Amino acid sequence: MKDAVPRAGLDLASMEEAIADPTSHAEEVELNQKSQLEAGHWGVPLFVHRGEPFFGQDRMDSLCWKLEKDGLKL
């Protein structure tokens, strides 16, 4: 992690500080779980774009294609 985090443009110390209290993220986790269930899924990775679910690593290419089709520059 200490090598990968800076390559991603992030700061490990600030990340560790942010997750020091696991209860501080409970509300966000619950909201994410609720959103997943509303989209009709329960696992990861899951992305929903304009109501269309993209579930699993094998759907990432399809998601990128759809995002580019909708104008996002990747």
Image (spheres, rainbow, N blue to C red):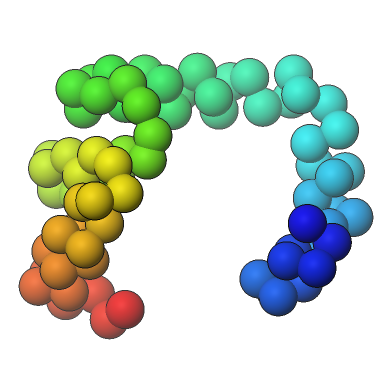
- Horizontal side of 49 relative to 22 (left or right) equals left
- Horizontal side of 7 relative to 36 (left or right) equals right
Count every numbered label the image shows and give the total. 0
User: Which quarter of the picture shows residue 62?
Assistant: bottom left
User: Which quarter of the picture shows residue 42?
Assistant: top left
Position of residue 54 measured from the top left corner of the image (x, y, whole percent): 20, 44
Q: Is residue 8 above or below residue 30?
A: below
Q: Is residue 59 above or below residue 39?
A: below
- Horizontal side of 45 relative to 41 (left or right) equals right
Position of residue 68 measured from the top left corner of the image (x, y, whole percent): 17, 74
Front residue of this view, candidates 3 and 27 = 3
Residue drawn 85% across the image and 45% down it: 16
Position of residue 72 measured from the top left corner of the image (x, y, whole percent): 24, 75
Q: Is residue 15 above or below residue 34?
A: below
Position of residue 69 measured from the top left corner of the image (x, y, whole percent): 9, 73
Residue drawn 21% across the image and 63% down it: 61
Q: Is residue 10 visible in this depiction of the protein?
A: no
Q: In the rendered image, which quarter contains the N terminus?
A: bottom right
Residue drawn 76% across the image and 24% down it: 22
Residue drawn 73% across the image and 66% down it: 4
Q: Is residue 36 visible in this depiction of the protein?
A: yes
